[in-house]
Image (cartoon, rainbow, N blue to C red):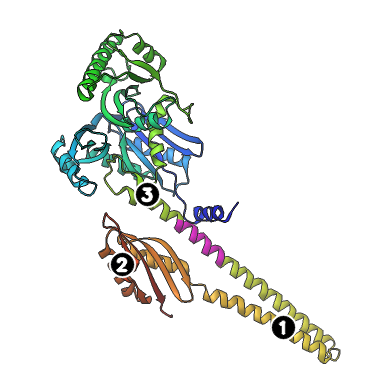
Amino acid sequence: MNHREWLKKIEQIINPTPVVGGLEIDDTGIKFLKISGTGIKKEGLRFAPGIVQGGKIIDKNTVESALKAIHKKIVSEKEIVPVVFLVPSENLYIQTFTVPNVGPDALPETANLNLQILSPLPFEKVYASWQTIGTPEENMDNSEELLGAFIEKEIVDEFEKIAVRAGFSFVAVEFSALAVSRVIIKEGVEIKKEKAYIVIFFTRGGIEMLIIKNEHLHFHRYTPWTFFSQDIKEAKINTAHLKEFLENEIRQIINFYTARWGNAPEESIIIGEPSLLSLIKTLPKENFPLNIKELSLKHFPDTGIIWLSVLGSALRGLIPRSGDTMVSLAGTSAYTNYIQPRAMHIARFWRKFFVTSGVFFIIAWSVLNVFVMREKNNVKKKMENNPGAINVEEYAQLKERAENLNNEIKLVSLVSAQNPEFSALIKLINNNAENLATIEHLSVSNDGISLGGFSKSQDMVFTFKSMLEKSGSFEAISLPLSNIKISEDESARFNLTAKLKAR
């Protein structure tokens, strides 16, 4: 193992990257999945009818208790589990739209203006997001094609509040169609990126109809099973009604595709239980003139059908947070939610480190003290028993030995004295950094301290510096402008140095 691999291992211990899993809560229950190496870990619980209904939480206490039970099986009680959350499809609104080629700098503002126009509800009441699905190079009219998604804020906020109380943290919020598209593109066997696919996905909650083209989701329609039967408890589906629906729905999607891209689609992927897949295969060829393919996966072939969506969200969790530009209907900063578990883990590591160091010095000092006292008593007894037997040479040797031991005791005491009260120091810095900055590294030496981190703006960095000055515990605080790096989103990374005031 070379030195780089050793350094990576040390960095992973001190500053680990938490595994982001996928979490889904819908009418049928809760599903959590995370990818670890080449394997997956799954935990799930089923709901009785009426706990979550129509994609909205009805029994909050039951959902919270179920989430806490899942959390307990995954990690220890105090650990936060970062997840990509799958919001139920029932209350989702998706729309593709195009904008002129305005360049990367102006694209976010242009896209957001279009989202405000397309929003199905007053814009202040929804979470809205977008992602690019067609570039000017791909479109003949030199336009950008975008996928926009909307959901009512109140729905997401309710799920997030309960999840946070149960120990989970949302780093992104997406929907089943986006997650399943990711599974098909990244994990589907014999899936060709240059081809377009009409996807029919039979889920526990209903039927998802998708169009995937150029590795992007371009169309989504969700129909719950209650459309075919109002008897939720019995879940009886009228097969004739379902078959008629599929014929009409597939015909409409093929017509939409042909009108949009000028040619008829050729490929279809069907996902579901064998009985439903058999029903698809019995449709008349004129109503379903597509090459049918059942989905099989490259790396996770044993993943059940009901886990495909949450597997897709877990695959998204493997993407570095800074590189995740896909639709996210989250109410807070996904990056902040991602950093929180990392910061807590780092704090726990250094707390254990300093406690262990302190215990070591105390034990070392105690052992040396006992040893010195024993030697002192031995010499004293020897002198008392035979005071004339000790010659000058022996006395000099004993004196030298005692002095060496005293020097060792002084050395241990000096090291202990120079070891600052790190726990108190970290607490002091964290108190001043609260709501202003997130500390990423801290080092302490005889010359003082050096710390670095990031903040939402440059002004908040200077406010943090001012708080340290007012605390009365530091002096000579140095924060040159060259040590502040401003990002495109106006967030700021910084490094400052300071000296601890003598006590």
In the rendered image, residue 31 lying in the magenta stretch gets the answer: no
Residue in the foreground of this view, choosing between 441 and 162: 441
Q: Is residue 243 above or below residue 207?
A: above
- Vertical position of residue 380 compared to residue 282: above or below: below
Left or right: 8 in relation to 434: right
Left or right, 288 with respect to 71, comes to left
* Type of the residue with mark 2: Phe
The x, y position of residue 29, in whole percent, is 37, 30
Q: Which residues are magenta?
A: 346-357
Residue, disc 1:
402
Disc 3 or 1, which lies upstream in sequence? 3
Q: The C terminus lies in which quarter of the figure?
A: bottom left
* Proximity of marks 2 and 1: CB atoms separated by less than 8 Å: no
In what element is the residue under mark 1?
A: helix
Residue 299 on image: x %, y %:
48, 31
Q: Disc 3 and disc 1: Cα gap in Å? A: 56 Å
x then y, percent, for residue 389: 86, 89
Q: How many marks?
A: 3
Residue at coordinates 38% horizontally, 36% vertically from top-left? 313
Which three-letter amino acid code belongs to the residue tagged 1?
A: Ala
User: 10 Å neighbourhood of mark 3: few (<14), some, or many (≥20)?
Assistant: many
